[in-house]
Amino acid sequence: MESLLLRVVPGIAEQWKGSTPEEIAQIEQIAGRPLPPFYRWFLSRMGQSMGPLSSSTLDFSVQRILDCYAEGLVEPDPRFLLIAYESDEMMPLHLFYDFSAPARGDALVTKRDAQGGELYDMFETLREKLARGVLFSYRVSVMPQRCSGILEGDDPDFLSRLDPVMSGFGFTQPVTTGRICRLYERPDAVMLCNGAPRAGVGNRVAFTLGGGNAETLRRILGVVSTESSLNVLVRKWQPELP
């Protein structure tokens, strides 16, 4: 993950700022368990400031997390740990770890009200959420042509059939992902695939693909469709095609 950020996000090494060991220990005490290794890495690099990755309303800083618990906005819970405070009053759902779903040295990221309530699962891991956001913001969104849609398969692990196809087409996977998420990139194109954990929507995920032109994107999607046997449904082109 660190190599991806240093390669893709300009100036991040000079602008991010990590938490102190004492701050990390305070978060771990609130969690009541050892923190996931990935979250410890995240806090050690970006716990005080995410630099250019900082959001105007979503605050991942360790100080904000500690303040929320100290002020009683969020109560300690053995299952959930607040990891980002949302200040947008129109959508005041905060990000939590759900420790009932650990994965790959990390844990599931869900959204909910500070005091509990319905869960809106986002990613199987914080690693996947951050990597997907970085690749979209710093690579896909600036590409001349983009498209998005749905990939469908006939078994729960259908995305694994994409791996050899994309590798053969020159793509690499910058971070480790799970069953419902894939992140592929090469110098001239990036493909992001992800579904919501525990959503019960069947064997389908959303995808976004960016590249230099529509011909390149059509070629990639054609290979995906024919060589992986997945059903590819393109729903939107940006900009729209003539």
Image (tube, rainbow, N blue to C red):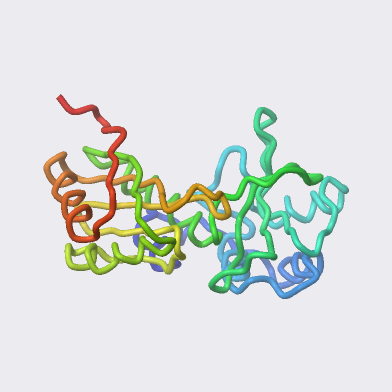
Residue at the image position 44 percent from the left and 61 percent from the top = 156
Give the side of residue 90 with respect to residue 202, left or right: right
Give the side of residue 104 with respect to residue 177, left or right: right
Give the side of residue 133 with respect to residue 167, left or right: right
- Nearer-the-camera pick, 111 or 62: 111
Where 118 sits versus 168, above or below? above
- Most distant residue in the top direction: 242
Residue at the image position 39 percent from the left and 46 percent from the top = 206
Q: Quadrant of residue 234?
A: top left
Q: Position of residue 75 (x, y in %)?
A: 85, 53
Where 89 sits versus 41, above or below? above
Where 77 sits versus 37, above or below? above
Q: Quadrant of residue 140?
A: top left
User: Which quarter shows the N terminus?
Assistant: bottom left
Residue at the image position 54 percent from the left and 55 percent from the top = 123
Residue at the image position 17 percent from the left and 55 percent from the top = 226
Q: Position of residue 54 (x, y in %)?
A: 54, 47
User: Which quarter shows the C terminus?
Assistant: top left
- Nearer-the-camera pick, 17 or 56: 56
Q: How many marks?
A: 0
Give the side of residue 178 with respect to residue 43, left or right: left
- Most distant residue in the front direction: 154
- Nearer-the-camera pick, 115 or 150: 150
Q: Position of residue 60 (x, y in %)?
A: 63, 52
Q: Position of residue 175 (x, y in %)?
A: 41, 67
